Structures are given as structure tokens and as C-alpha cells.
Image: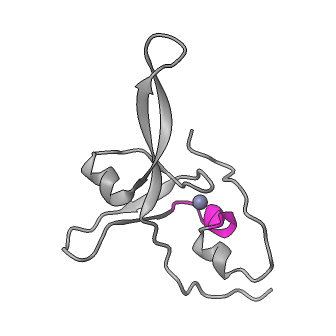
Amino acid sequence: MATKALITPEKFYECEVKRRRVRTTGPGYEPFWKLKTLADALLDGDTEFRCKDCHGPLKLHRRHTPGTPSYLEHKLKVDSEHCQQGARFLEAADGRAHRQSATPVA
Ligand SMILES: [Zn+2]
């Protein structure tokens, strides 16, 4: 298969962020992942992100100019190729199936 140049840059504005909540089974806290918009996550000061679909690590691109929102993309090319919201996955014309990240953020 011929290699195709990446046309669409990957930009997500939604992600899962790591939060803590009171443990339901005993004392203390337990971590959990919560789906949020990136704008909300940045306002809330969240620092741990993962892809909502493949759970792979994401790279944050912060923008400080009004009108140009911050965005996320897959940190790993392999996740972008196999995650259903990955730019490379969406451009692949081989009918591949969505796959969870081999290196999920836990
Ligand atoms: Zn993904």
C-alpha cells in the first residue's frame, strides 16, 4: 500500500481525565476516569489525560491566543493509526477495526 501524506491534523477537544473519588468499598479515595471537554479540564487544572476511545496517552497543545483553542492529539502514532477517532485511522482505507491502545494510561 502506498504511503499517503497525513492531510488532516489530529485535534481532539474531549478527553478522559484522572480524578479521585471517595472509595465506595471502604475508607480512602480511588482514582477514576471522567469524560470532559479539554476546555473544562484545563479550567479545572487536570493534568492527566487519556484518549476516551483507545485510552492511549495524549499530547496537549496549549494555545494562549484568543480564538485558537487548545487541543489534544495521540502521543503515539500507532494509537492514531488504530483508534477510531485517530486521524490516521480515519484516513486508512483498508477497513481496519478500532483497537485499544497497547500502552493504555491506567
Ligand atoms: Zn485514541
Q: How is the image coloured?
A: one colour
- Quarter of the figure with the N terminus: bottom right
Measured from the top left, where is residue 47 in percent x and y?
A: 36, 45
Image coordinates of residue 43 in percent, x first then y, are 25, 51
State which region is magenta. 74-84
72 within the magenta span: no
Q: In percent of the image, x 60 and y 56: which residue is there? A: 53
Q: Is residue 65 left or right of residue 76?
A: left
Residue drawn at point x = 39 percent, y = 60 percent: 60
Image quarter for residue 81? bottom right
Which quadrant of the structure image shows residue 105? top right
Membership of 82 in magenta stretch = yes
On screen, residue 27 above or below 80: above
- Residue at left offset 69%, top offset 50%: 102
Q: Position of residue 20 (x, y in %)?
A: 42, 30
Left or right: 93, with 25 as reference point:
right
Name the residue nearer the viewer: 22 or 97. Answer: 22
- What residue sits 53% from the left and 52% below the top? 57
Up the image or down, 99 lies above or below 92; here it is above
**Which one is in front, 12 or 40?**
40
